Image (tube, helix red, strand yellow):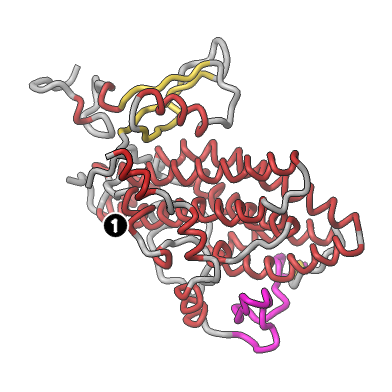
Amino acid sequence: MTPYTEDELKKKIRGGYILESPEEMTPGYRKALIVQLTVQADTELMSAPAYWFAARHAPSTNTQVSAHAIIQDELAHANIAYRLLEDLGVSKEHLVYGREPHEFKHPYGFDQPLDNWAELVVANGFFDRAGICLLGDVHRNTSYGPLKRALVKVDMEETFHLRHGEVWMRRLARAGGAATELLQRCVDWMFPMTIEWFGLPDDLKHHSGQLDYKLKGLTNDELRQVWMSSTVPLCERLGLSVPAHYDEEDDEYVLEYPFPCEYDPEAKRWLFDDGEITWGAVFERWKGRGPMNEIYVDSVRRSRASVASWLN
Amino acid sequence: MRTGLDEGVYEVFARKSRGEPLRHIGYIDAPGDELARVYAWKTYDEENWFEMCVVPRGAVIPVNRVEGPWAKNVPEGTSGP
């Protein structure tokens, strides 16, 4: 039984209180934390097959090692997040093996195929940076002690993934010719993909309680700005064009395309010319999942049943 | 449902270098002690640990706190220290 009402717990948390076990949680807190951890765990888990399929395009044994080291990290992060969920009474067995592929809560970006080495390194540069923005904020602000400690390792390793992405983006950008053209094509679909990942703008967002419970510190729009404040200058330094710029007067990054807008996953192209769509339409697209959803989910669990049957 | 892949929880402790405290760094699910050692070492590879060990969750006996992951290990009929 929780010893606090929702308001009492929120007040304690505002004063710096750190929760250490589920017994201290109110139903609202527990529910918000479970949603947050499920998104986190599913995202880490689904990044693994996305990167794993792409790692086949690694151009050397060294790059094979670094690509697979990243995949290994992602799986460990997923494992840790599912373990935290298990302590909240949620079954890891069900989450990983019992759900339909479309029920996973990872972002739409990890339903897309990464078809070459450039797409993998831009994923490291863009998607892993989004991971750092989101989880770094959780690490600094979360009121749940076990999560704060678990994120020490996660932050450390995501920073390595980001560096891997940046270093390789720089190499491809300097090469010129076909390499740079390919890199630009990656940026063209992956930049807006990451922007959308941060979710509903603040003026449309229903109050989820994640901020009141200090499960995170920054809003969606603030996190989107944090991501752009490092990604846009990086791309500009590398001579890559991105559909966003810094506006000095308003002291913020501004998108130069209709947001949100529709995406053609087969062509890997955003339909800027078709104009702005509603967030309802975006949620429909997310719910329908992307082209690799079933393949990725199957790839992390295909042998579970047969091995389990051998052991019984 | 028992699957033959059933796992128990192990607490993972590690020390960064000589002179440092042994810290609780996380947990791992494993079907036995041997694989718990392997999984812990492979999962928590963010540091070059001087020392790492694993303890089955059921073996941690709380002394002064009666909630949290080890609560059910409090010996019956006892209260605080």
x and y percent of residue A90 in the render?
29, 50
Magenta stretch, main secondary structure, is loop
Any magenta on residue A261?
Answer: yes
Task: Pick whichever, A135 or A39, lies toward us.
Answer: A39
Residue A67 in the image: above or below residue A116: above
Quarter location, residue A7: bottom left
Name which quarter of the figure residue A83 lies in: top left
Q: Is B1 situated left or right of B32 in this image?
A: left
Q: Is residue A262 magenta?
A: yes
Residue type, numbered disc 1:
Gly
- Is A213 left or right of A217, judged from the image as shown? left
Residue reaching furthest to the left:
B77
Residue B27 horizontal/vertical position (percent)? 40, 32
Q: Residue at x 78, y 50 (%)?
A: A168
Residue located beneath label 1 in the image: A28
Q: How many marks do you count on the picture? A: 1
> From this viewpoint, which residue is outermost toward the top?
B19
Q: Residue at x 69, y 70 (%)?
A: A189
Write down the region rendered in magenta. A248-276
Q: Residue at x 62, y 52 (%)?
A: A128
**The residue tagged with tag 1: helix, strand or loop?**
helix
Image spot of residue A130 (x, y percent): 61, 56
